[in-house]
Image (cartoon, helix red, strand yellow):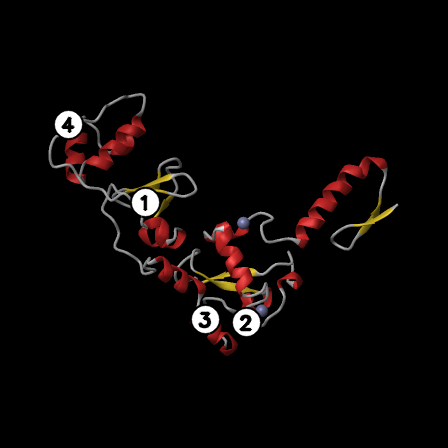
């Protein structure tokens, strides 16, 4: 028996291959409905609804040259094009591979893309939400941001640090590129205590102590506490 797989190849099948055939059919059928096969759009912080809106607005055709998304290799769907100057969340629109490959940040924009580039989706979308797309001033040391993907980021003296993976750090520029202005609105801006602060010093939970120190005390207050505890720096906690 010969069965054509989605790649156009065929191979002979035996009984043992039946499960593979089912998987093949499943994959082949999802490839004809590619929009949410893996919700790749969430990488750009687009919700399913926003992505659908984009797809419908362009009728699933490249926004500059009109090439149908269903013909676009390798996954038969359009690429999500973003403005590198702002960050991953700055989605301009949907393009075929050929056009997407020509709109790179290091080359002058081609003339045929002028109308498209003059009216990027993210500028309209964020204006409608009433959220500024300009980079905001960096919140003070000790400010905390809960990322939509789970980890908490805290601003230390040097950088923004991922609390669950301490070696992962970003500067404010990186934070503004990786998280959309909608997310960054939810930063809990640090306000340092002016009166007494009660911090539970549980030696079994050193990271909690470190976080409490960063959250409640200014850098000067913190170094005074560390000096009192006979520690050189917070990393020793
Ligand atoms: Zn989706
Ligand atoms: Zn195109």
Between the C-alphas of marks 2 and 3, the distance is 9 Å
Kindly give the residue lying farthest to the bottom in the view shown: 111
Assign a secondary structure to mark 4.
helix
Q: In terms of image quarters, where does ligand 2 lie?
A: bottom right
Return the mark for residue 228.
4
Q: Which residue is mark 3?
A: 117
Q: Is residue 80 visible?
A: no
State the image coordinates of residue 16 (x, y, percent, origin top left).
82, 35
> Label 1 crowding class (10 Å Cα cut-off): few <14, some 14-19, many 20+?
many
Assign a secondary structure to mark 1.
strand
Q: Is residue 77 visible?
A: yes
The answer to whether residue 34 is above or below residue 227 is: below
Q: Which residue is mark 2?
A: 64
Q: Residue at x 49, y 50 (%)?
A: 42
Q: Residue at x 59, y 63 (%)?
A: 60
> Label 3 crowding class (10 Å Cα cut-off): few <14, some 14-19, many 20+?
some
Q: Which residue is mark 1?
A: 160
Assign a secondary structure to mark 3.
helix
State the image coordinates of residue 10 (x, y, percent, origin top left).
82, 51
Q: Nearer the viewer, mark 2 or mark 1?
A: 2
Between the C-alphas of marks 2 and 1, the distance is 38 Å
Q: Nearer the viewer, mark 4 or mark 2?
A: 2
- Marks 4/3 in contact by CB < 8 Å: the verdict is no
Assign a secondary structure to mark 2.
loop
């Amino acid at each position: 028996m010969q069965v054509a797989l989605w790649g156009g190849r065929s191979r002979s099948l035996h009984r043992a291959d039946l499960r593979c055939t089912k998987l093949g059919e499943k994959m082949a059928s999802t490839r004809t409905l590619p929009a949410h096969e893996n919700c790749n759009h969430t990488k750009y912080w687009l919700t399913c609804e926003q992505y659908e809106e984009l797809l419908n607005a362009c009728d699933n055709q490249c926004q500059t040259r009109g090439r149908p998304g269903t013909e676009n290799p390798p996954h038969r769907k359009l690429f999500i094009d973003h403005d590198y100057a702002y960050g991953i969340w700055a989605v301009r629109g949907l393009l075929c591979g050929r056009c997407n490959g020509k709109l790179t940040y290091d080359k002058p924009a081609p003339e045929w893309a002028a109308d498209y580039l003059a009216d990027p989706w993210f500028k309209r979308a964020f204006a409608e939400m009433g959220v500024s797309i300009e980079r905001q001033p960096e919140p003070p040391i000790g400010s905390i941001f809960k990322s939509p993907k789970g980890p908490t980021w805290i601003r230390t003296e040097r950088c923004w640090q991922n609390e669950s993976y301490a070696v992962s750090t970003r500067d404010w520029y990186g934070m503004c590129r990786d998280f959309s202005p909608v997310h960054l609105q939810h930063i809990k801006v640090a306000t340092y205590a002016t009166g007494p602060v009660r911090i539970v010093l549980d030696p079994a939970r050193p990271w909690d102590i470190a976080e409490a120190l960063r959250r409640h005390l200014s850098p000067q207050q913190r170094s005074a506490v560390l000096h009192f505890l006979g520690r050189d720096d917070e990393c020793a906690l």
